[in-house]
Structures are given as structure tokens and as C-alpha cells.
Amino acid sequence: MQEHRKRAVEIIADRFPKAKECGWPTEGIVDLMLDAQIEMPPLLSRTLDQLYLIGQAGPTLLQLISVTLQYNKMVETLAHRVRANVDSFNPPAFKESLSGHLRLIEMNIAEPDRQLASIHDESSGGGMT
């Protein structure tokens, strides 16, 4: 999921402005915008009702899912606006609108890894000899 987030950041920061500067056609801009959505790993989607089993990381993963779904919906809404009126395509404003969600997604990707590593360390003796 981290790679999808990085790709979204690159699209928003680099490719949105280039598309505007080069005068891309409306559908090209809309497709590019939709490419900035972050794909949810199928395993994560299928195991939503079992996340409580992994302790502290469960709520963080639920928040990651929620924020990612909200982000994807925002991208979709912005793409629909551009499809209706290509002049509304404003890369700096879109970047600002989406950056908060991207930061939260980044934080929520890192936190479960840390929490799960802690659980793993505890269950394997915590490195004590």
C-alpha cells in the first residue's frame, strides 16, 4: 500500500501540473486523476471483521482503511468536477486538498507495522536471553 501512496503523491505533485501545462484533453486529465487513487489490498478488505484479533494494530488498520476510502472518494469527486468543467482543474489546490489525507495514510501505514513488530517481539520472548 505504501507504493500506491508514493505513486499517488508523485502523480499529484509532478504529473498534475505537467498535464495542466501541456493542455491535456479532459479525459486524459480525468484518467490521470483517477490513477491517483490508492488501491486497497484485497486481503485487508476481506479481513475487516477480524482486525480486532491483532490487538492495537486493529484500530489503526481500520483508520487506514477509512482514510484511504475517504481519499479515494475525494479524488473521484474532483475528477467528476474536472470532467464537468476542465477549467476547474487546479493542481496546486487539488494537491492541498488531498495532502492531509495522504499524510494520514502514510502515518497509518507505518503505525501497524510498528505495533505488529512489537506484538511479534513479545510473543517470541522479546529478545531476552
Image (cartoon, grey):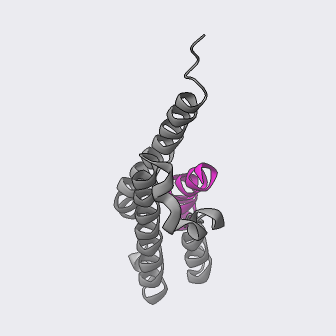
Q: Nearer the viewer, residue 53 or 45?
A: 53
User: Residue drawn at (43%, 44%), measured in percent from left and top?
Assistant: 107
Side (left or right) of 77 relative to 11: left
Give the residue displayed 52% in from the left and 63% down from the top. 50
Q: Is residue 22 left or right of residue 59?
A: right
Most extreme residue toward the bottom is 84
Figure quadrant of residue 4:
bottom right
Image height of 13 relative to 16, above or below: above
Q: Which residues are magenta?
A: 1-21
Count every numbered label the image shows and give the total.
0
The quarter of the displayed image where residue 78 is located: bottom left
Q: Position of residue 11 (x, y in %)?
A: 57, 58
Query: In which quadrant of the rendered image does the C terminus lie?
Result: top right
Q: Is residue 11 magenta?
A: yes
Image quarter of residue 97: bottom left
Percent across and percent down for residue 5 are 55, 54
Residue 98 in view of the camera = yes
Which residue does the image show at 58% across and 62% down from the upper left? Answer: 44
On screen, residue 13 above or below 129:
below
- For the question of whether residue 22 can be seen, the reply is no
Q: Residue at x 47, y 63 (%)?
A: 65
Instruction: Work out whether residue 116 or residue 37 is closer to the camera in this orientation and state it.
Output: 116
Q: Is residue 120 left or right of residue 64?
A: right
Q: Is residue 53 above or below residue 21?
A: above
Is 8 placed left or right of 76 in the picture?
right
Nearest the eye: 15 or 5 = 5
**Residue 41 is covered by the magenta coloring:** no
User: Where is the N terminus found, in terms of image quarters?
Assistant: bottom right
The x, y position of residue 95, in whole percent, is 41, 58
**Magenta stretch: helix, strand or loop mostly:** helix
Q: Is 110 situated above or below 88?
A: above
